[in-house]
Image (tube, rainbow, N blue to C red):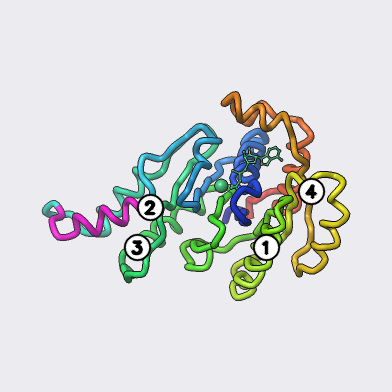
Amino acid sequence: MPRTIAVAGKGGTGKTTIAALLITQLILQNRVPVLAIDADPDSNLGDLLGLQPEQSIGDLREEVLDVMKKLPAGMTKASYVEAGLHQIIAEADGFDLIAMGRGEGSGCYCALNNMIRKFSDDLTPSYRWVVMDNEAGLEHLSRRTTRNVDALLVVISDNPLSLRSAEKIQAITEDLDNRIGHKYIVTNMIPEDRMEVFRRRLETLRIPHLIDIPYDPNLEEVIFQGEPLKNLNGSPIMNTIQTIIDTVGGEDADS
Ligand SMILES: Nc1ncnc2c1ncn2[C@@H]1O[C@H](COP(=O)(O)OP(=O)(O)O)[C@@H](O)[C@H]1O
Ligand SMILES: [Mg+2]
């Protein structure tokens, strides 16, 4: 099975950026294929990776519900979903990208959701790594839309509210512990002169602090210019990303 990293935290803390950097570094090291999952309905993981799926899983669910009654002769719901799932996977060199789209809503489309889940679960063993960018509420993780996670990165930034979010994530995930191997705090973009105060605040959490990613003007520039993230190869920020990969992946993910 692949190694799975999920990234969570308050909006604006750097989740999508960190997920995209993890994916980029894995590709640079040829630890491929990587499955990138964009589980934030406000998604832009694809933008950072230069790839966009035509349709999200949420779109597919809506579409299936829509056409269910008028399916072409001989086509079962399952085969329709299967055909659709192949369409929602965007493929690029070294990685594929799936967007979850909007959540399941309150209606129970259980049979349909289970079907989608089964097909996406069947897909994952063929990848070496799975990197998932989550929305702040962790809806997809808590609703079991996803398989087990080896490491959940909870990102905290300078915004004190991100610490509140981390506490909430801590509470939500304590119910999911059997499905999350390790949880780590990743601090991002915290000014040096505030780091000491932050460290003390982090001690109130039950999640260990894995690494601090400093604000990187080069990263900002690369994104602003629309350059590929692989241009950051070997830069200090990629070294911090490498530490995360080493911690989660050990030698690799072949077992
Ligand atoms: N370490 C960093 N150095 C410089 N800019 C960063 C860093 N991390 C994130 N950013 C910038 O911060 C903003 C928010 O990051 P983003 O990944 O979109 O957050 P989230 O996905 O948590 O909402 C983006 O403009 C991103 O380019
Ligand atoms: Mg994001």
The local crowd at label 4, few if under 14, some if 14 to 19, many if 20 or more residues have their Cα within 10 Å, is: some
Could you tell which of marks 4 and 3 lies nearer the N-terminus? 3
- Provide the residue designation for mark 3: 115
**Contact flag, marks 4 and 1 (Cβ < 8 Å):** no
- Provide the residue designation for mark 1: 166
Of discs 4 and 3, which sits in the foreground? 4
- Provide the residue designation for mark 2: 57
Please state the extent of the stretch shown in magenta in the rendering.
Answer: 57-71
Image coordinates for residue 59, horizontal then vertical, percent: 33, 51
Q: Let me know if residue 35 is in the magenta part.
A: no
The quarter of the rendering in which ligand 1 is drawn is top right
Could you tell which of marks 4 and 2 lies nearer the N-terminus? 2
Question: In the picture, which quadrant includes the N terminus?
Answer: bottom right
- Residue found 66% across the figure and 27% down from its top: 221
Question: In the picture, which quadrant includes the C terminus?
Answer: bottom right
Above or below residue 150? Residue 108 is below
Image coordinates for residue 163, horizontal then vertical, percent: 71, 61
Q: Amino acid at mark 3?
A: Met
**Contact flag, marks 4 and 2 (Cβ < 8 Å):** no
Q: Is mark 4 within 8 Å of ligand 1?
A: no
The local crowd at label 1, few if under 14, some if 14 to 19, many if 20 or more residues have their Cα within 10 Å, is: many
Q: Amino acid at mark 1?
A: Ala
Residue lying at the far bottom of the rendered structure: 175
Marks 4 and 2 sit apart, C-alpha to C-alpha, by 33 Å
Q: Secondary structure at mark 2?
A: helix
Q: Secondary structure at mark 1?
A: helix
Of discs 1 and 2, which sits in the foreground? 1
